């Protein structure tokens, strides 16, 4: 409402709006810290303030009693206006909130519990059906699954803006941008997890696993400066500050309409618990909020600039190596390492305008970029020749890195070979090889790995877009209320061609002479168009809620390059002596594809409040919907055989019960999700098709399970909480598939086999205790203790190429071992291991927090002390584990029907086990001083 209000008038400000919206939501995992023994939903209608004072207008009065009466009347009038604004705004929020579903809300307590060692992904483990692990401290290669869907298949947003890679899904292509992230733990205030299919108004582009909606940290109402320092296990340090302006009364606004500014910076460095994997992170956030229309409208600006650089495991370390050298051992960097240096920038401009009680209009504009430089190195002495042991082999394992030589593909480069192109790709690695090593490989008739044992690549992506939206709440008609939400998302993301350079030492030069791929002009791009509509219809005295809706998506994707292998060779190049003598395969290439999908959704819920008063707070709900995930733009490469796959589609059905009354909240649900047209791929490692890839849409998966959550506020000081989830996930067809949640193993799924890397059971239980005035008046002491159980996970192993796994779509059958195409597809392909598995484990964590206020201490207003302990009992556990055959340089098949033919790059290695060990016990101490 646009009626005038003096500066002292209080209306519903953005922070209150957020709290009210959460309190009105009965999602799993939400708890009201101030609820105590009162009903959460009933507390929403209580205005923040219903008393306001104003100055009486100056006038001559003959009686002080008359003056007092006039002032009192003015106070009541303005107070009534303020109360009207607040109550009406709260009613709109209650009306606009979505009906119950399986959403989970996680806030400040969960962020603090994750601690400095955690990441924006690790806090998600507190939600049902979400599993998370990572390879180090901070935002270090996090891996997530939601109801069995991989992180690549799950959308992530920050304040409604898509944060996932629009070109490839998730965080981007495999092994890209794994150190650091677009936003960090200390830059968020909470997160909402919508598993499966979210409401159309909450969904975003490209997901068959759900939407994870993060909320940014916003400026505070009070002026202060926080200075923070932390020290923890594994040589971990963190320093930072947060400066809040508070409400800046002035020409831009007064009171609730006054602007607020926040600037926050932190620097963290760690040696990490896995040896030789140090990392450093810098995170900066600038936030500006400008409320208007008596606090009912809001313009906000958010700028994030984060960096992350460090080393990581070049591959999961073989278990035989860890058994010999230690559970958290790693290869010495002189032997092998992986390293990344990443920059991330995000700018979000957002405006939500209250027009009247029936219409709210909003628009968000955003821009993001990320720069990622990755270096992989492996000592030439550590490469295996035809599967032979090296000085670094333990238990049959050989080192593997993401380099040309690591895949045994060095023979394709250099003068006279298929990847050589005069004037473009002229690098000849053999010239960098020591004579002794070169002669040893030459004697075996193989190309030396020297010169292809180190590789550096650079990836740049730019994303920009706009998200307009309307919320329409027309007057009730025959007792029926409608809340209509209409919106769109239009965005474009572009990437470079990821130029890649090779060398023989870790100091790879980014010069034209060292370039082996990604040259020329061009890149990948995807333009996406999305529109949504939903209408929440409240019937029968607001007890029955029906929310139909839909999302329409369209994408135009493409890949263009002037110098790409598999492109059209120019006439001038084809006429050269070199191309006449040898085969030239590099030239101009362009591919585009238009995809579109219609994705319906409906939710029905029923509240028993007004039907059976004794069952107040009890609701039933059911949801059905579809969502889509589009093929990565990398699939548009000319090296891909066949057509680019169509979008994968998930079909979701879920139903549940929610009970939220006074001091207890209970939620139980059942879900079933089926993925059709599941993506799969394989790269040919030998034969005439070596270097080509096959992509398919023949896969199918089904996930079904149960989820439950309970929050019980036993007393105003003690809260008990817990949740559990059970998941059964299987493949419904034999097909090429991405076989692991880690997204690093491609292979063959057989019909009926379980999906690997997904726990069958997950659970979190804990207790939260807080009290005031423990040591001194006004202090706060909080203890939060929790345990997290992770159930059994299935694992994988690599096929040798000589096993019969049945008929494979697009490949054919085993044919008694005579089908060479079947051999090259299945050799090294990953599949379910019926004899493997990761044992269940349970990890306990403890967080102690004490906040001490100060009076008459100058600028010092408070000190906050926090002790965070992860893995309290130092339990050893495997996060990820599998058996593999490392690729290498192989000669020919020695026996059988295919004897004499070229062996696959996976055809001469031996099978061994490797994995990623979970984080051991760690302690972090943090101290924060607040000045004001």
Image (cartoon, rainbow, N blue to C red):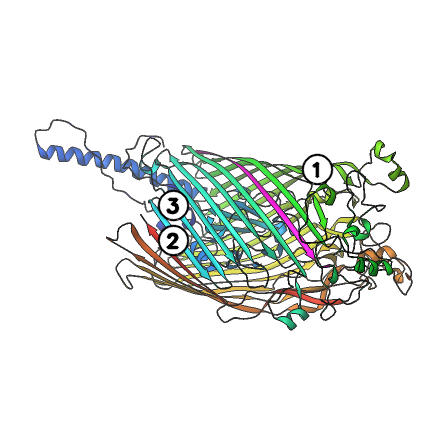
Residue at figure coordinates x 40%, y 48% from the top left: 242
Earlier residue among tags 3 and 1 = 3
Asked whether the residues under the numbered discs 3 and 1 touch, taking CB atoms below 8 Å apart as contact, a structural biologist would say no
Asked whether the residues under the numbered discs 1 and 2 touch, taking CB atoms below 8 Å apart as contact, a structural biologist would say no
Q: Name the residue under label 1.
A: 558
Where's residue 579, x and y in %?
Answer: 87, 39
Query: Crowdedness of circle 3 by 10 Å Cα count: few (<14), some, many (20+)?
Result: many
Residue reaching furthest to the front: 435
Marks 3/2: CA distance? 33 Å
Residue reaching furthest to the left: 62
Callout in the foreground (3, 2)? 3
Q: Can residue 581 be seen in this view?
A: yes
**Magenta residues (range):** 356-379
Q: Mark 3 points at which residue?
A: 243
Is residue 645 inside the magenta stretch?
no
- Element marked by disc 1: strand
Question: In the rendered view, would you say 21 is above or below 59?
Answer: below
């Amino acid at each position: 409402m646009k009626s005038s209000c003096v500066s002292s008038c209080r209306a519903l400000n953005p922070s209150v709006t957020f709290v009210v919206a959460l309190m009105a939501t009965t999602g799993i995992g939400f708890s009201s810290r101030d609820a105590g023994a009162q009903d959460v939903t009933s507390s929403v209608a209580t205005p923040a303030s219903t008393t306001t004072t104003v100055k009486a207008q100056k006038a001559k009065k003959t009686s002080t009693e008359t003056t007092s009466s006039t002032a009192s009347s003015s106070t009541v009038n303005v107070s009534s206006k303020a109360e009207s604004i607040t109550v009406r705004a709260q009613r709109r929020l209650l009306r606009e909130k979505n009906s119950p579903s399986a959403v989970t809300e996680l806030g400040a307590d969960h962020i603090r519990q994750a601690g400095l060692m955690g990441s924006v992904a690790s806090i998600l483990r507190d939600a049902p059906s979400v599993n998370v692990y990572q390879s180090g401290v901070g935002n270090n290669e996090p891996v997530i699954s939601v109801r069995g869907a991989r992180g690549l298949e799950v959308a992530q947003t920050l304040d409604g803006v898509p944060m996932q890679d629009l070109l490839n899904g998730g965080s981007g292509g495999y092994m890209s941008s794994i150190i650091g992230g677009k936003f960090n733990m200390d830059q968020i205030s909470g997160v909402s997890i919508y598993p499966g299919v979210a409401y159309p108004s909450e969904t975003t582009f490209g997901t068959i696993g759900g939407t994870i909606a993060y909320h940014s940290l916003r400026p505070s109402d009070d002026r202060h400066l926080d200075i923070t320092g932390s020290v923890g296990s594994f040589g971990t340090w963190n320093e930072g500050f947060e400066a809040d302006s508070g409400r800046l009364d002035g020409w831009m606004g007064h009171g609730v309409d006054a602007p607020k500014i926040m600037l926050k910076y932190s620097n963290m460095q760690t040696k990490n618990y896995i040896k030789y994997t140090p990392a450093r992170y810098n995170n900066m956030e600038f936030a500006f909020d400008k409320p208007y229309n008596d606090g009912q409208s809001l313009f906000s600006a958010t700028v994030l600039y984060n960096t992350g650089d460090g080393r990581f495991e070049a591959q999961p370390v073989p278990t035989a190596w860890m058994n010999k050298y230690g559970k958290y051992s790693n290869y010495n960097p002189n032997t092998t390492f992986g390293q990344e240096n990443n920059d991330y920038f995000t700018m979000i401009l957002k405006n939500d305008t209250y027009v009247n009680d029936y219409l709210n209009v909003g628009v968000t504009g955003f821009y993001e970029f990320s720069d990622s430089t990755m270096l992989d190195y492996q000592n030439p002495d550590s490469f295996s020749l035809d599967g032979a042991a090296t000085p670094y082999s333990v238990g049959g394992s050989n080192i593997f890195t993401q380099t040309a030589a690591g895949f045994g593909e060095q023979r394709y480069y250099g003068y006279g070979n298929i990847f050589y192109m005069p004037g473009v790709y002229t690098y000849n690695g053999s010239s960098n090889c020591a004579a002794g090593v070169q002669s040893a490989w030459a004697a075996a008739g193989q190309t030396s790995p020297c010169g292809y044992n180190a590789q550096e690549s650079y990836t740049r992506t730019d994303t920009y877009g706009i998200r307009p939206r309307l919320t329409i709440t027309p007057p009730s008609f025959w007792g029926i209320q409608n809340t209509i939400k209409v919106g769109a998302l239009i965005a474009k993301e572009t990437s470079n061609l990821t130029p890649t350079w090779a060398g023989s030492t870790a100091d790879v030069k980014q010069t034209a002479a060292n370039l082996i791929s990604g040259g020329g002009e061009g890149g990948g791009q995807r333009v996406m168009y999305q529109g949504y509509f939903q209408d929440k219809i409240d019937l029968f005295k607001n007890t029955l809620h029906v929310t139909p809706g839909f999302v329409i998506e369209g994408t135009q994707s493409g890949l263009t390059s002037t110098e790409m292998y598999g492109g059209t060779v120019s006439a001038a190049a084809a006429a050269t002596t070199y191309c006449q003598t040898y085969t030239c395969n590099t030239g101009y290439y362009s591919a585009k594809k238009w995809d579109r999908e219609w994705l319906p959704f409906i939710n029905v819920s029923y509240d028993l409040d007004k039907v059976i008063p004794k069952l107040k707070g009890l609701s039933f709900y059911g949801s059905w919907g579809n969502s889509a995930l589009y093929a990565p733009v990398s699939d548009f490469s000319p090296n891909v055989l066949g057509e680019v796959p169509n979008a994968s589609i998930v079909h979701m059905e879920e139903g549940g019960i929610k009970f939220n009354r006074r001091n207890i909240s209970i939620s139980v649900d059942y879900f079933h999700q089926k993925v059709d047209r599941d993506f799969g791929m394989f790269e040919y490692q030998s034969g005439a098709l070596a270097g080509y890839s096959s992509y398919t849409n023949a896969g199918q998966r089904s996930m079904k399970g149960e989820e439950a959550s309970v929050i019980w506020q036993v007393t105003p000081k003690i809260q008990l909480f817990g949740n559990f989830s059970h998941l059964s996930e299987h493949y419904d067809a034999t097909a090429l598939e991405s076989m692991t949640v880690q997204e690093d193993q491609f292979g063959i799924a057989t019909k009926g086999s379980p999906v690997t890397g997904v726990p069958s059971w997950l659970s979190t239980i804990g207790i939260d205790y807080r009290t005031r005035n423990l040591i001194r008046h006004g202090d706060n002491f909080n203890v939060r203790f929790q345990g997290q159980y992770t159930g059994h996970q299935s694992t994988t192993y690599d096929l040798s190429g000589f096993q019969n796994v049945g008929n494979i779509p697009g490949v054919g059958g085993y044919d008694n071992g005579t089908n060479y195409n079947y051999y090259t597809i299945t050799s090294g392909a990953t599949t379910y291991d019926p004899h493997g598995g990761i044992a269940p484990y349970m990890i306990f964590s403890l967080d102690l927090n004490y906040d001490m206020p100060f009076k008459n201490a100058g600028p010092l207003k408070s000190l906050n002390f926090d002790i965070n302990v992860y893995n309290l009992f130092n339990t050893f556990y495997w996060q990820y584990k599998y058996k593999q055959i490392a690729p290498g340089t192989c000669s020919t098949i020695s026996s059988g029907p295919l004897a004499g033919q070229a062996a696959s790059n996976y055809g001469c290695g031996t099978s061994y086990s490797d994995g990623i060990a979970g984080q051991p016990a760690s302690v972090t101490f943090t101290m924060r001083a607040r000045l004001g």
